[in-house]
Amino acid sequence: MLKRLNDLPIFDSSRWPARETLARVVGILAVTGFVLRRILQLPSWPGYIREVDWAKPFFNKLSFLPGFLLARPFDLDWRYAYFGYTREQVRILWSLEFMVWILETGILLGYVAGFLTRAPAKVPARGFMESVYPLLLALLPFAITMTSYTYPQWMPEHVHTHLRGLYALNMALVAGAALNVLGLFTLRKAFTITSEARVFVSGGIYSLIRHPLYTAHFLIYFCYTLLHLQPLTVALYVVFVAGQTLRARIEERKLAASFPEYEAYRRSTGMFLPKVRG
């Protein structure tokens, strides 16, 4: 049944009219929507500390917006002072979270740059597994972040390891987001979400890892799984990792068939981590 689904003409992107323009317009509009929503989420995450209270009047003017767009304000100073944390500790947390916000927003802007500057597809996506499956998989992690924030339930605020845990998770998020930005910058003209062959990239971070973006996603969404820890998010994360691994193998078969030099590159690099050389 999967083979019959995969072979349906509707999933052959080479038959889609103006597919490059359509993908560019839809992709940029979708990413722009995500960026705007992230800006409207600032009052909740990273939230307010005394130094940024000047932003409250601006967001208060937008209070007519529905809750799924404009997040409810969260005062870190008030919340953590109640549990005895110092002002300096709260500022470290806020700074880390704001750094994550900047880098993750930078990832979204990197997608816009990728859509605008990428080269035409040498071999377009064909079949459900190359054209639709990657899009569905790319949306899956958002289900993790849309679940309830459960970190305080298994690491309560009155336990001093609570803030240390948040420091560690946010530093890991910074590392993952930075790797993602670096990977996008290196990929540029070869950027694609569906399984297409555009330009063969083997320099920069790609000289060590064949799929640095997926490595970054594994780290980023592992952190979010811990912040939203529950059976559903663990299951979603496991499915995501398995799905991305399959997606990477599909892409590699496509690239190997399109670029003769890819097989030698594949043997000399690791898929998600640098290859250990004996």
Image (cartoon, rainbow, N blue to C red):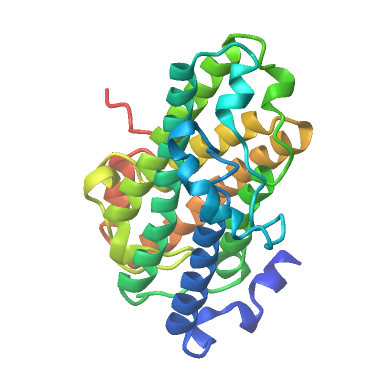
**Residue 148 x/y as whole percent:** 74, 38
Q: Residue at x 27, y 57 (%)?
A: 201
* Residue found 34% across the figure and 65% down from its top: 113
- Compared across the picture, whether 176 is left or right of 163 comes to left
Q: On the image, which quarter does residue 205 sit in?
A: top left
**In which quadrant is the N terminus drawn?**
bottom right
The outermost residue toward the bottom is: 17
Does residue 82 show up?
yes
Of residues 3 and 114, the one nearer the viewer is: 114
Q: Foreground residue, 73 or 45?
A: 73
Does 155 appear above or below 27? Answer: above
The residue at the point 54 percent across, 68 percent down is 30
Q: 178 or 148: nearer the eye?
A: 148
| Horizontal side, residue 214 vs residue 74: left or right | left
Q: Residue at x 59, y 18 (%)?
A: 81
- Please name whichever residue, 138 or 7, is drawn nearer the observer in this view of the structure: 138
Image position, residue 152 (x, y; %): 69, 23
- Residue 203 is situated, as x and y percent measured from the top left of the image, at 22, 49
Q: Quadrant of the C terminus?
A: top left
Tell me if I can see residue 259 in this picture: no
Q: Is residue 54 left or right of residue 47?
A: left
Task: Give the quadrant of residue 145.
Answer: top right
